[in-house]
Image (cartoon, rainbow, N blue to C red):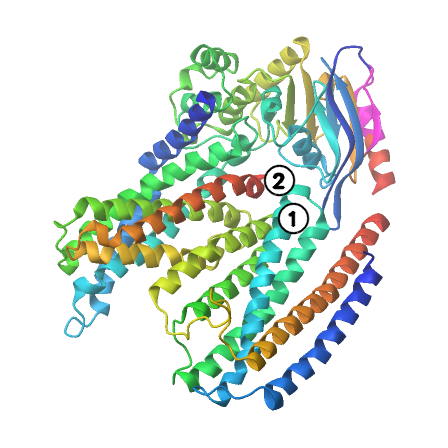
Amino acid sequence: MSSGRLVLEAKGLHRNYGSVVAVDDLDLSMSEGEFLTIVGPNGAGKSTLLSMLSGAMRPTTGSVSVCGEQLDFGRQEWRHRIGMLSHQGFLYDRMTVEENLHFYGKLFGVTDLEDRIASRLRRVGLSERARSEVRKLSHGMRQRASLARALLHDPDVVLLDEPYSGLDPAASLVLRDVLEELKDGRRTVVMVTHNLREGLEMATRIAIQVAGRFHWEGSLKGAGWEDFESRYHRVVEGRV
Amino acid sequence: MSTYLTQVWAILRKDLVLEIRSRERVGAMCAFAVLTGVLFNFSIDTTTVRPNEVATGLIWMTLIFGGLLGVGRTFHLESQDGALQGILMSPAPKDAIFIGKLIANFVLLFVVSLLVLGVFGLFFGIDLGRNLSWVVFVLGIGSLGFVAVGTLFAAVAEGTHLRETLLPVLVFPLMVPMVIYGVGAMMPLLSGRPFTEVEGNVRMLGAFALAAVAAGAVLFRYVVED
Amino acid sequence: MTTAGMRRGGVVLTVLGLAGLIALYWMCFFWVSTEVNQGVIQRIFYVHVPAAWTSFLAIGFAALASGMYLWLRDDRLDRAALCAIEGGLVFATLVLTTGPLWGKIAWGTYWTWEPRLTLTLLLWFIFVGYIMVRNSTEDPDKGKRFAAVVAIIGALDIPFIHLSVVWFRSLHPEPVVAKPDGPTLPGDMLATLLFGVLVFSLLFFGLFLFRYAVEALRAEADLRARSAA
């Protein structure tokens, strides 16, 4: 565990849909600069966990705190601290990349909005497509635009739900660079994926989630991902 | 407060920009309104019923059906790329989101209602010259009340697997006061009666609209939270 | 209250209600004097009015429970709202059956847009809307929230619907009980009516507790299935 400031904390997090349990009494604490990758088979409750950490979904029981502040659904301030990139882009097809970012910037109350948009677009390499409607972009470009959207308000916690799915090599490269920068900038990152190869090398911590719980936590510690893969299969097969 | 207004304006502007670019809803609603007028014309036996006497009722019915057509899809455009989740994860209060979408829907429905008024006036030979500004005012309040209830339940319907099919069941029973007071105010106005005669009805229509907006703004957060 | 306690309470209230119902029918048919203007048909009034009272009690109760559910998120409140709505639906259906039966003889037509009958019809649709919404979501919690919103909006709209349909048309006999200068209904008729209201309220709460106990058992079974999984 790194010794930095505690940024993200979940206690006894539980969520069920009727009689189906998606996340089962899960605890998690993360400090600044940590990068957690959660892997697990489909239906393990990874997306539900991420939705609860992002404040998009209310836990059935348990609580989430960001920077020591418990997520209170009557208040909105803590939402400034969270940025989310999902496999959906949250973008409007009929608006340009710039207009989309402008819209979200206004909602988040970003002050130096024009400069911020220009710098984020430069970072994801979309400056020359700023005035294209989103529907005219390739999937990779959309994801890059969405990455710019997720980071527009400078969140402390960045949550990624299957960010690599369907990305072309150029977009994967941009994403990897941006994630490295977030890590260097002492941001806290949680990434969820069902594909083992993606982004494991960046993770400072890895968790294997099966049936709503973490069944293994650790890190690669110099071992290749092939070693991890065999461990993963042992853990998953033991629990399913 | 100014952040709040900025957020309302951002939602409102976004909805209007999207509507102006795609013209999906306004096109469908206007076509619906005109064609309904045509069908109504052939469904009335003009030898027994004087068209201008039933026109007021037909205008309100067209407004409600057409309104449901457009307002019912207001969250559909958010759900395409998960954008609704993006908005809900922003710090914008849920009531600001509701008010923004409500005003956008109001603008849309009000424009359509003016078209309905004009077209039905033409088709059924109503003299619109008398009390036109009061008639437009009544249509405006009626649209506001409808849009408040419609926007809230459009969010409900979008979250169910029945989608838009659920909307009439939920919305029509609640719309009875609006139809009664709306028609009750507009019919005398169109036949040249002074506004003072229908003031009570217009007040009730206004009270209904205000109550609907307030209830919607309070309850919307419970509909969209996950 | 425990589920077993609920069930016991349900049994007691329902048995009381059913016994009361027999007494009410006896009063209706053999005791109360015949109303002069309308004749024998007026006796349906002792079932019709208490049923209507109960269905409005149900929506009020459901809206209150729904509001508290949205606030406290206690599943028991949602269950209470659901059970009240289902009870309300039953009694509203009773109103919509007895009303036209009476109307056919009193007015010569099964259906008129009499304000209170119209209001009950719309209330019936609000009950149906509640049940439809509650059953049409994948995530049951979402259905509970949606349904709560329907109950609250429905209850808020009732005064507006009432005022508007009264304004629209009133063919029904003027209200006879709650007049400012005191009831004008003859004593035995008033007694029968009030007794009917009491009996129907008892029945409503008896059935409510039964239904609630079933829902509570279902929730327990769900919980057990969840912890076994």
Is residue B74 left or right of C199 when viewed as pictured? left
Which residue type does callout 1 highlight? Asp
Q: Which residue is mark 1?
A: C139
Name the subunit of mark 1.
C
- Quadrant containing the N terminus of chain C is bottom right
Q: Quadrant of residue B151?
A: top left
Report the front residue among A209 and A100: A100
Q: Judge the density around disc 1: few (<14), some (14-19), many (≥20) Cα neighbours within 10 Å.
A: some
Q: Which residues are magenta?
A: A214-231
User: Mark number for residue B226?
Assistant: 2
User: Could you tell me how many numbered marks the image carries?
Assistant: 2
Q: Is residue B133 above or below residue A224?
A: below
Q: Amino acid at mark 2?
A: Asp
Furthest toward the front, the residue is C181
Rendered position, C169 above or below B23: below
Residue C167 appears in which quarter of the rendering? bottom left
